[in-house]
Image: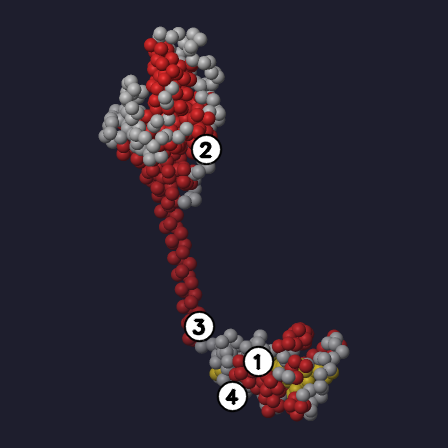
Amino acid sequence: MSGHVFLSHSSHDTGTVEKILEYLESRGVRCWIAPRDIPPGSDWAESIMNALAGSETMIMVLSSSSNQSAQVRREVEHAVNAGVSIIPVIVDGTEPSVALRYYISAHQWVDASGGLDEGFLRRLADSLLEEQSEAETAAPEKGGVTCDKRGFSNPSGAKHCVECGGRIGPPVEKSKKSKRTIRIVSIVIAVLVLAFVVRAVVRGAGRKKLYSRAMTALQEDRWQDAHRAFERLGSYRDSPTRAYQALLGGIQSLHQRAAVLEAEQSGNADQEWDHLSKACGTFLEEYPDSTASQDVRLYLADALFALQDYTEAGEAYLELAEEDTDTHRVMRTAVRSCESFIAAYQTGGSTDTSAILQRQLRAVSLLADLEPPPRQLVPLVGRVASNHFQAGMYRTSADLWRRIFLHSPSDPARLEAASRLSECYLLMGDTTEAERWKLLATGELPPQSPEGPVQMADSLLPAEDSSVVVEQPPPTPRVPPQAGPRPDQDQQRPPGGRGGARSGSTPGRD
């Protein structure tokens, strides 16, 4: 761009200069200002020199800041040497320095210290437009050079365009080469668009085919293949719903098949239970808020028990029992939890014996709160009492056997409880109480006699029981001193326990 107005200023006067620039350009005056018009990456000094060489007029904004600016002084000096007309505009009443006065003393100053009002800016724009019009009229039709990048006109001798920073060269017309380039670019774009369309069509056909195969696998009960295929399809059609159905259906099928193999004592049962546990884990990870998650958690607990991970199974059953609101389901899972923790203790599946015993009490207490028939509750309480006896927790064991004695519906169970109570008190050093319970066990002392057991609360296991909570197992071997028959001598190892043959079902399975 030749014939423009060069604005020389200090960076401290940006607000004033931008006001002048905005008004002049709104009137059509071509302006050049740094740093706005310096192309990125260009040499600053070279750009300034090229801009000065192509300008007709310089507006020097004179202020206290520009008066001390060496950059402004150099720009004024080069403008004078290039024969550029200079218009000094004083904006704050500052007198020019001696160095500046040397260069601008021959030019008419404009005092704008009273403010850049519209009248002043209008007169300035009119004057500049008139000068640019005269310069364009007087300029020869040919001459100067144009940049190769955007075709801007530049003064003769310029090496870089003052507008865009492009290389300077002679003006040229669009050649056949340019037309050929445009044609090649158009062809490339058309090919890319076509490739995109073909890819979309092929991908759509592939997804449709995969969806069909997934549906076939789902109908044929090949749930693993169906689930993987629907997962690959992502959000295609109803794939998310189908993937959910495939995984849930597969879990239910695995559970049924594993239960049948377990009942048949097949050697493949372990493999099916392992597949079931992994499938349940995947489901709970992908669909934690599903309405079927509670059933899946129950299937997972069954698989853990079948795989002899009794502690984890008991925790899973107990958590389900405490969260559920359906009485029937709570009773079933509480029974399973109690059986799991009993098996965990008897097989030595956990190093934290105290925690296992506490969970036994927690599970059996939860079951007792539901008031099941004594024939269902008493055997479980008896097994828990035996475990505490083996651990040396005689007070807790005695409390549990005493409650069995008071609430058992059958005489053999009551007599067994009395016998166990006699052993507990003997080991605790209370020979009088031990002898009394021994008489009750042999029938020599009627239960309702004055020397019989003290009547207790109706609840088999009350919520607050200090003996259950406080007592801890002593650091002694599990096997107590010989004081009559072992309390657990009639207890068999748990179904599926380590070292024993597994029975045909998981705990409490309906």
Q: Name the residue nearer the viewer: 354 or 50.
A: 354
Whether 27 is drawn above or below 401: the answer is below
Lower position in the chain sequence, tag 2 or tag 3: 3
User: Pointer 3: residues within 10 angstroms few (<14), some, or many (20+)?
Assistant: few
Whether 424 is drawn above or below 357: the answer is above
Numbered circle sitting on residue 157: 4
- The residue depicted at 71 percent of the width and 83 percent of the height is 94
- The residue depicted at 41 percent of the width and 17 percent of the height is 402
The quadrant of the image that shows the C terminus is top left
Which residue in the structure is indicated by mark 1? 1
Disc 2/disc 3 C-alpha distance (Å): 66 Å
The quadrant of the image that shows the N terminus is bottom right
Way the structure is coloured: secondary structure
Lower position in the chain sequence, tag 1 or tag 2: 1
User: Pointer 4: residues within 10 angstroms few (<14), some, or many (20+)?
Assistant: few
Q: Name the residue nearer the viewer: 367 or 258.
A: 367
Q: Quadrant of residue 192?
A: bottom left
Numbered circle sitting on residue 179: 3
Q: Is residue 40 left or right of residue 210?
A: right
Q: Is residue 375 left or right of residue 57?
A: left
Disc 1/disc 3 C-alpha distance (Å): 26 Å
Which residue in the structure is indicated by mark 2? 291
Q: Is residue 362 left or right of residue 120?
A: left
- The residue depicted at 58 percent of the width and 75 percent of the height is 36
Question: Identity of the amino acid at label 1?
Answer: Met
**Badge 4 vs badge 1, beta-carbon distance below 8 Å:** no
**Badge 1 vs badge 3, beta-carbon distance below 8 Å:** no
Q: How many marks?
A: 4
